[in-house]
Amino acid sequence: MVNVFKLVRILHSVYEPAFKSSLNPVQAAVLEVDIHIINAELGIASTAPQHFKMSANDASKYDPLPKTGEQHVTYLKQWFLNTRQICYEILGYETNLVDQFWGEKSLFEGLTQQIFVCFDCMELRHLILFLKHFLQPMYVNCPPDLYPSIGGPFKRNIA
């Protein structure tokens, strides 16, 4: 669990203004939401890259390695988004493990120093993933006697 905490902290810190300002335009483009994803969410037709509109039958023909710079950027955008969501889901599922998750000695330190950070620079799309896949299961599965110790750090960091 500690390694997942560290990975989440890295994913959060990549969006901090000080870090983002140090990136060149191509690197910064990796952190921006893909226009094809926005169009898909809004129901607008677009010429999405092939892997966005691939059917199950086409999967055997798909070459997962990007060939162009634009394909690399698109691939990395998707990798960042998938990695973030998977980390939140892992942590959300771990909240069901009462003794292993809630009994972890470094849990509160990890939450306050690794997870409940960078909310001020977190994009809405990432905050929604965080709330849905981690925070909601965490509060649902939290033992009642731990509410004050969990709620305090979260409230301090989101305010």
Image (spheres, rainbow, N blue to C red):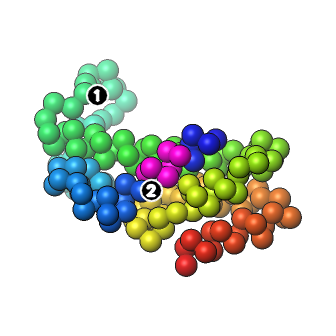
* Displayed quadrant of residue 71: top left
* Displayed quadrant of residue 20: bottom left
Q: Residue at x 63, y 74 (%)?
A: 155
Q: Residue furthest left?
A: 68
Q: Main secondary structure of the magenta part?
A: helix
Q: Residue furthest top?
A: 60
| Residue 33 visible in the displayed image | no
Image coordinates for residue 38, horizontal then vertical, percent: 29, 60
Which label is found at residue 64? 1
Identify residue type, mark 1: Pro
Identify residue type, mark 2: His
For the N terminus, the image quarter is top right
First along the sequence among labels 1 and 2: 2
68 with respect to 133 (left or right): left
The residue at which mark 2 appears reads as 12
Q: Residue at x 84, y 64 (%)?
A: 144
Name the residue nearer the viewer: 6 or 69.
Answer: 6
Image coordinates for residue 124, horizontal then vertical, percent: 42, 67
Task: Measure the C-alpha gap from mark 1 to mark 2.
Answer: 26 Å
144 with respect to 61 (left or right): right
Q: Residue furthest bottom?
A: 159
| Residue 144 visible in the displayed image | yes
Under circle 1, the secondary element is loop
For the C terminus, the image quarter is bottom right
Residue 37 part of the magenta segment: no
* Displayed quadrant of residue 114: bottom right
Task: Say few, some or many: other residues with alpha carbon within 10 Å of mark 1 (under 14 / 14 to 19 / 20 or more).
Answer: few
Image coordinates for residue 12, horizontal then vertical, percent: 44, 56
Q: Residue at x 37, y 30 (%)?
A: 56
Name the residue nearer the viewer: 74 or 105.
Answer: 105
Q: Residue at x 13, y 35 (%)?
A: 68
Q: Which residues are magenta?
A: 6-12
